[in-house]
Image: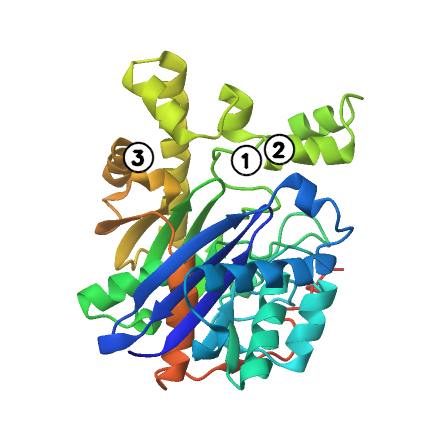
Amino acid sequence: MGERILAINPGSTSTKIALFDGADGALHELFSVKAAHTSEELTQFPTIQSQLQFRTRVVEETLTAQGFALSDIDAFVGRGGGLMPLVGGTYAVNALLLDHASRGMNGTHPAQLAAQICDNYAKRYGKRAFVVDPPNTDEFDEVARPTGLRGVYRESSVHALNQKEVARRYCAAHGLRYEDANFVVAHIGGGVSVTAHRRGRMVDSNDTLRGSGPMSPTRAGDLPYIDVIELAYSGEYSKTRLVDRLNRRGGFTDIFGTSDMREIEALAETGDRRAVLYRNAMIHQLAKYAGAMAAVLNGEVDAVILTGGVTRWTDFAERLAARVRWIAEVAVVAGEFEMEALAAGALRVLRGEEKAREYTGEAVWGQLTVNN
């Protein structure tokens, strides 16, 4: 038996819990559970922070049901969230990180509960607690931040956890170090992020949260901003309703009434003209962004990596790969590996392969002041 690592990833309507063992120099999954939470369960909590005890109890009950005890765990690792913009990596949970997570210093999301749950267990049993590549990871080059409007800047909103994990997996399989290689990584799921990785840092990408990039199953992607302004002032939308249409019910959900890509796949396979058109349009937009990220890397790209749930659609992945193969070798790593990424980050620290970072609360970038 090797190191036992419990990974915790709270989401909007579920909590993912997985236990891993580091025996034989590898990482082995002992169990993985996605504990769903009903709207009735969650509506009794006025804030995300007030869900802390509820989510903690869910984790403990799940572990017990699987036949394991908290005392058996060597390290607890969570998704992280609510933190100030930071460089990616594995962070030891400290008092400041807990304070910022509990307050949602940089936006609220259930992921902010993970560090608090892990810290609770670590202190109770004298073990270690970490967060890995939190959603607040921001490694952009300064030149990637300015826009054509004074006071408006681009920030990193990327699927950091899964993107860095698949890049590291590619490196392990090809004898490379992530810190020495360059990649274009496209995470294609409910949201999409197409990102330039330069020697271990994600230096530019579209914004999967605030609204840019290719269309996706749930997001509208790039739109002519005059048309968006017209919608905003049409009298048909409140701010909340318009954001919801663009960022949660946009994309294929708006066009087809579903975000289930299996349904779109089935339509496309029958030759449905609209399904084929929008599938091809999404591939076109993804290829366009991949080309842009290749330009960010000056064309020096070791591989283009396609990942995320949509890449399980083999025909989609093959069509996209054909469009971007001119950039570099294409690797398809279908699915998502967030739980494995959490455990792997903790394991690297436990084995001394990587030093845990210290959370300082100092944002990795401040708003630019030039011409303000």
Kindly identify the amino acid type of the residue bearing the numbered disc 2: Leu
Figure colour scheme: rainbow
- Labelled pair 2, 1 in contact (Cβ < 8 Å): yes
**Residue 219: mark in rendering:** 1
Question: Is the residue marked by circle 3 packed among few (<14), some (14-19), or many (20+) residues within 10 Å?
Answer: few
Vertical relation: 279 (above or below) 198: above
As helix, strand or loop, the secondary structure at mark 2 comes to: helix
Give percent across and percent down for residue 248.
59, 36
Observer-nearest of 14 and 217: 14
Q: CA distance from mark 2 to mark 1?
A: 6 Å
Residue at 72% across, 60% down: 49
Side of 361 relative to 77 (left or right): right
The residue identified by callout 3 is 313
Residue 282 in the figure: left or right of residue 359: left
| Identity, as a three-letter code, of the amino acid under mark 3 | Trp
Q: Earlier in the sequence, mark 1 or mark 3?
A: 1
Q: Are marks 3 and 2 in contact (CB under 8 Å)?
A: no
